[in-house]
Amino acid sequence: MDEIIIRENLSKVIKTIIFATINIFLCFWYFFNGTVNSMILNLILGILLLLLCPLSLAFIIKNVIYKRALLKIDDNGITVISSLSSIGFIDYNNIKSVYAFEKLKQKFLAIDLIDLHKVINNISPFKKLIIKFNLKLKYPVICINLDTSHMDLGQVLRIINDRLEDNLKP
């Protein structure tokens, strides 16, 4: 079978960029409001958000410029490269289940693994922290946001489950 590459839809990504830019302006407001009014919570929140939001926006813009794929699905497994916390290649033999997961009106492709330690040993400490944080919040091990993809979540789910079934047949 062929490799299926799931990319981002440019119009959806532009909406995300506009939203992220507005968030950065709100971060500046929190920071300056906290500085002027001596509100420690606003100051701390502003600093944290000023560190995180521009990094996220830069990552989104970089993906648009280089036309990076969100997911690659082939005969051996799935390669997840959709976000800063993506873990890379996941072998079909290590996938327990794949399903749709919705939280706060965002749809995610959720993947549960058979052997989590096999994947965690090969990723950076930052990505390990994200996975542990997901588990503490009762999220699936791997959550892939497909809101900006050019394919519907149901289509992607069908493709992955078909490939998973084909791979598990003797």
Image (tube, rainbow, N blue to C red):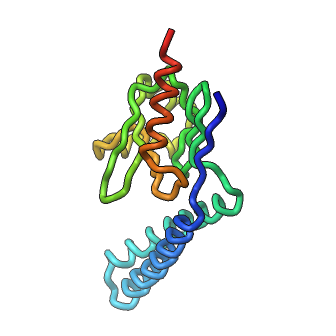
Q: In the rendered image, which quarter contains the N terminus?
A: top right
Q: Is residue 38 above or below residue 83?
A: below
Residue at 52% x, 65% y: name it.
12
Q: Is residue 157 above or below residue 41?
A: above
Residue at 42% x, 35% y: name it.
111
Residue at 49% x, 76% y: name it.
24
Residue 130 can be seen in this image = no
Q: Position of residue 91 (x, y in %)?
A: 55, 26
Q: Is residue 160 above or below residue 8?
A: above
Question: Considering depth in this image, is 90 or 128 the residue closer to the camera?
Answer: 90
Residue 59 can be seen in this image = yes
Question: Considering depth in this image, is 35 or 97 the residue closer to the camera?
Answer: 97
Residue at 64% x, 62% y: name it.
64
Q: Is residue 158 left or right of residue 67?
A: left
Q: Position of residue 96 (x, y in %)?
A: 40, 25
Question: Considering depth in this image, is 12 or 88 the residue closer to the camera?
Answer: 12
Q: Position of residue 168 (x, y in %)?
A: 48, 16
Determine the residue located farthest toward the right in the rendered image. Answer: 66
Q: Is residue 131 left or right of residue 14?
A: left
Determine the residue located farthest toward the bottom in the rendered image. Answer: 36
Question: Considering depth in this image, is 59 or 52 the residue closer to the camera?
Answer: 59
